[in-house]
Amino acid sequence: MTFKNGWTISVQFGSGNYCENKMKPYDYGKNEDATSEDAEIAIWDKDDKDYDFGYDTVKPYCSADEVAEWIEKVRNF
């Protein structure tokens, strides 16, 4: 999702993402679940510069409330 300020947030929760649905590489595509209790997020600016969470550019295992908080933060960057 890209906001008017040029910042983008990606929210993913598939088998290849850092979330409760994470599977081993050989399990990708099997038993894909369309729901998840958490998700990974990534954020970047209009110049495609990744946001640094202080330890990585992907924030794993975010709760729904945390995802909502980050969406609001990014909207207001």
Image (cartoon, rainbow, N blue to C red):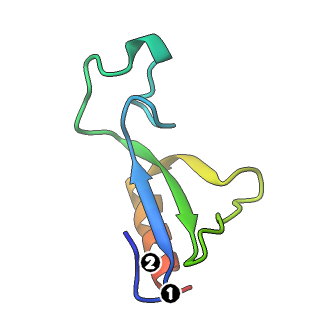
- What residue sits 39% from the left and 29% below the top? 15
Question: Tag 2, which secondary structure?
Answer: helix
> Could you say where residue 17 lies in the image, as x and y percent from the top left?
47, 36
Q: Amino acid at mark 1?
A: Asn
Query: Are the residues flagged by discs 1 and 2 in contact, CB closer than 8 Å?
Result: yes
Spot the residue most to the front: 47
Question: Tag 1, which secondary structure?
Answer: loop
Of residue 18 and residue 5, the one placed in the foreground of this image is 5
Q: Which residue is mark 1?
A: 76
**Quarter of the figure that contains the N terminus:** bottom left
> Could you say where residue 27 lies in the image, as x and y percent from the top left?
39, 13
**Quarter of the figure that contains the C terminus:** bottom right
Binning the other alpha carbons within 10 Å of mark 2 as few (below 14), some (14 to 19) or many (20 upward) gives few
Q: Where on the picture, by quarter, is residue 3?
A: bottom left
Q: Is residue 54 left or right of residue 8?
A: right
Q: Amino acid at mark 2?
A: Glu
Q: Is residue 36 above or below residue 28?
A: below
Dot label at residue 72: 2
Dot label at residue 38: none
Binning the other alpha carbons within 10 Å of mark 1 as few (below 14), some (14 to 19) or many (20 upward) gives few
- What residue sits 64% from the left and 63% below the top? 50
Look at the image and tell me whether residue 56 can be seen.
yes
**Mark 1 to mark 2 CA distance (whole Å):** 6 Å
Q: Is residue 30 left or right of residue 56?
A: left
Look at the image and tell me whether residue 24 can be seen.
no
Q: Where on the picture, by quarter, is residue 13?
A: top left
| Count of numbered tags | 2
> Could you say where residue 34 lies in the image, as x and y percent from the top left?
22, 37
Q: Where on the picture, by quarter, is residue 31?
A: top left
